[in-house]
């Protein structure tokens, strides 16, 4: 069961209270398609739930994933209002969105989440998707395709705002779909690491073994705690990155 509505600020609010059905997805699809057909756009999506309720059956799951594939480019931001149990489902959910930013808000912070989601604007797809989870002091990155220098510099500017208020911070970086990195992005990353060496707690690398093992085997110039995890152990990666 999912209660859904599109607010005047163009934020799609989803509040699942039980296993998601095909009828739930059909109702959401009808509302979103009507908005898009009228020339409007979604500013963002807000999902408010104590935990991920799952699907009623396989048909419901297929309908859900089909809907996301059709509309992933229409969602600039996704706000999660929940306790930390929802985070276990987040990595798999996030992979289906090409350009969305993710941000986790604690239960009870619905108004702040709505304000953040409403500021989303359509933008060109980027290889980088990222989110900030203040309750666990963790920055989440998902890399899709090739990382270009300009995209990474924008990400650094975003992270500088986080470090200005919080330290130390952990990272979980999902490299499952990484295709390559520009030399300029690598240099920018090294400068960022040197500047914030004392602000980084741990870095967990998840996904494509070619990239995670390669990255983990490189000389650790900054003496950071870094560990590679296979995709099947992404939940353990979240826990390891924020432990200690």
Image: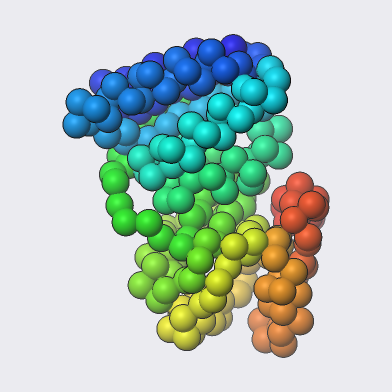
- Number of numbered discs present? 0
The quadrant the N terminus occupies is top right
Determine if residue 224 is in view. no
Query: Residue 136: where, in percent of width, then height?
Result: 65, 46
Query: Residue 105: where, in percent of width, then height?
Result: 53, 34
**What residue lies at 38% left-to-right and 45% top-to-bottom?**
73
Q: Quadrant of residue 107?
A: top right
The quadrant the C terminus occupies is bottom right
Query: Residue 221: where, in percent of width, then height?
Result: 67, 86
Determine if residue 11 is in view. yes
Choose between 114 and 7: the one closer to the eye.
Answer: 7
Q: Is residue 42 left or right of residue 38?
A: right
**What residue lies at 48% left-to-right and 31% top-to-bottom?**
67
Query: Residue 36: where, in percent of width, then height?
Result: 27, 30
Examine the rendered structure and indicate whether residue 133 appears above or below residue 84. below
**What residue lies at 27% left-to-right and 34% top-to-bottom?**
41
Q: Quadrant of residue 44?
A: top left
Q: Is residue 166 left or right of residue 161?
A: right
Q: Is residue 227 left or right of residue 159?
A: right
Q: Is residue 225 left or right of residue 155?
A: right
């Amino acid at each position: 069961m999912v209660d859904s509505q599109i607010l005047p600020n163009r934020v799609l609010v989803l509040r699942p209270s039980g296993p998601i059905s095909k009828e739930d997805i059909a109702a959401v699809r009808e509302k979103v398609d009507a908005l898009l057909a009228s020339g409007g756009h979604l500013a963002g999506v807000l999902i408010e739930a104590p935990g991920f309720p799952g699907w009623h059956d396989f048909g419901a799951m297929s309908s859900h994933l089909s809907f996301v594939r059709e509309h992933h480019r229409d969602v600039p931001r996704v706000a999660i209002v929940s306790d930390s149990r929802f985070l276990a489902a987040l990595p798999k959910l996030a992979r289906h969105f090409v350009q969305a930013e993710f941000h986790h808000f604690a239960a009870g912070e619905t108004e702040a989440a709505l304000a953040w989601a409403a500021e989303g604007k359509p933008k060109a797809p980027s290889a980088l998707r990222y989110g900030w989870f203040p309750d666990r002091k963790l920055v989440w990155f998902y890399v899709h395709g090739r990382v270009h220098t300009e995209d990474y510099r924008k990400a650094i500017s975003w992270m500088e705002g986080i470090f200005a208020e919080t330290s130390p911070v952990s990272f979980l970086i999902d490299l499952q779909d990484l295709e390559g990195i520009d030399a300029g992005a690598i240099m920018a990353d090294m400068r960022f690491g040197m500047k914030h060496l004392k602000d980084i707690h741990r870095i967990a690398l998840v996904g494509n073994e070619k990239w995670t093992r390669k990255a983990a085997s490189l000389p650790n110039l900054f003496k950071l705690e870094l560990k590679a995890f296979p995709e099947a152990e992404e939940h353990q990666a979240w826990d390891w990155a924020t432990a200690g």
